[in-house]
Amino acid sequence: MRRSAGVWNVLKLWLLLLAFCAALGAIGWVLDGYRLLSILVFCALLLAVGLYWYADRIVLGMVGARELVTGEHPLLHSVIERLATAAGVSKPKLYVIPDGFPRALSAGRGPGSSTVVVSTGLLQALPPEELEGVVAHEIAHARRRDVLVQVTAVVIAVSLVEASRVGGWLQRTLLFVLGPVAAAFVHVLLSEQRELGADEGAAELCGTPHGLADALLRLEQASELVEFRASPASEPLYTINPFEEEGIAALFSTHPPVAERVGRLRALDPEWATNE
């Protein structure tokens, strides 16, 4: 199941690339024949290569993350190394966001090259077992190659949303056009199943689903108490949706409801269901 999910994620990106090249090629052929077709297809391939190698770095810069060296948080490094070994992936790099809002995300290209990002607020808010559950969730995304699709989708979507700013006094009108286009792109590439699959993977890695379940509830409470400011197109990156689902932010919601995720996680423990 995990391998099929990873293959499907890569296949979606290839299909998107082929569709993009075909669309640009058709435009080039109509405007100037084979010469412009070749130029536009070549530019599309260069863009694809650039996104593959640098989209994760763009995301890290976008959220203002810096590398967290081993001496700053040896326990977290130890947890990540243990979970990565259990998942059969290379140990992810560890980055931190100097921000009090509790959040976590992952970036990279897959099992062999990934990064886990946590905020200082997350480190302060979650007890060890809940922090382990969140980290395991992000490592599960890397194992499933969700990270490659997520960062690609977010970089393109954020670029489209930010492009509306060039419209000056027409910014709202341009956003009305580009926002749904960016959201449609995100939903074509990403589905709610990726979060549910990563939740199950985290429960498997931790040996219990309850650390992540408790963490999801805590993160949801925090998001209701503290306003989160960022591009709504970055929503797919985070462990839960940190945005209020209204206005343009509602277009980019790709996470299942926290209550549903917690219920599924609890159900993985037959003893818990019996005690209830």
Image: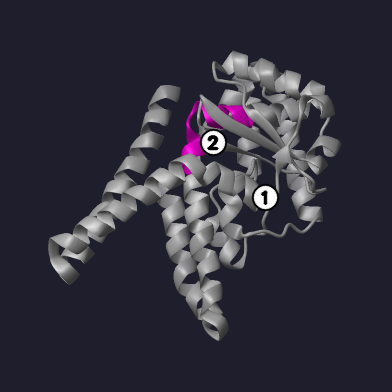
Residue at the farthest left position: 33
- Magenta span of residues: 137-149
Task: Tell me which corner region of the image, top left, top right, bottom left or bottom right, holds residue 97.
Answer: top right
- Mark 1 and mark 2 lie on one chain; the one further toward the N terminus is 1
Establish if 109 lies above or below 170.
above
Establish if 74 lies above or below 226.
above
Q: Amino acid at mark 1?
A: Val
Give the quadrant of the C terminus: top right
Disc 1 and disc 2: Cα gap in Å? 14 Å
Residue 139 covered by magenta stretch: yes
* Numbered tag placed on residue 108 in the rendering: 2
Q: Residue at x 35, y 41 (%)?
A: 12
Task: Tell me which corner region of the image, top left, top right, bottom left or bottom right, holds residue 57.
Answer: top right
Q: Amino acid at mark 2?
A: Gly
Q: Residue 47: horizontal and vertical position, in percent?
A: 39, 51
Q: Residue at x 57, y 48 (%)?
A: 58
Let me know if residue 14 appears in the view: yes
**Callout 2: helix, strand or loop?**
strand
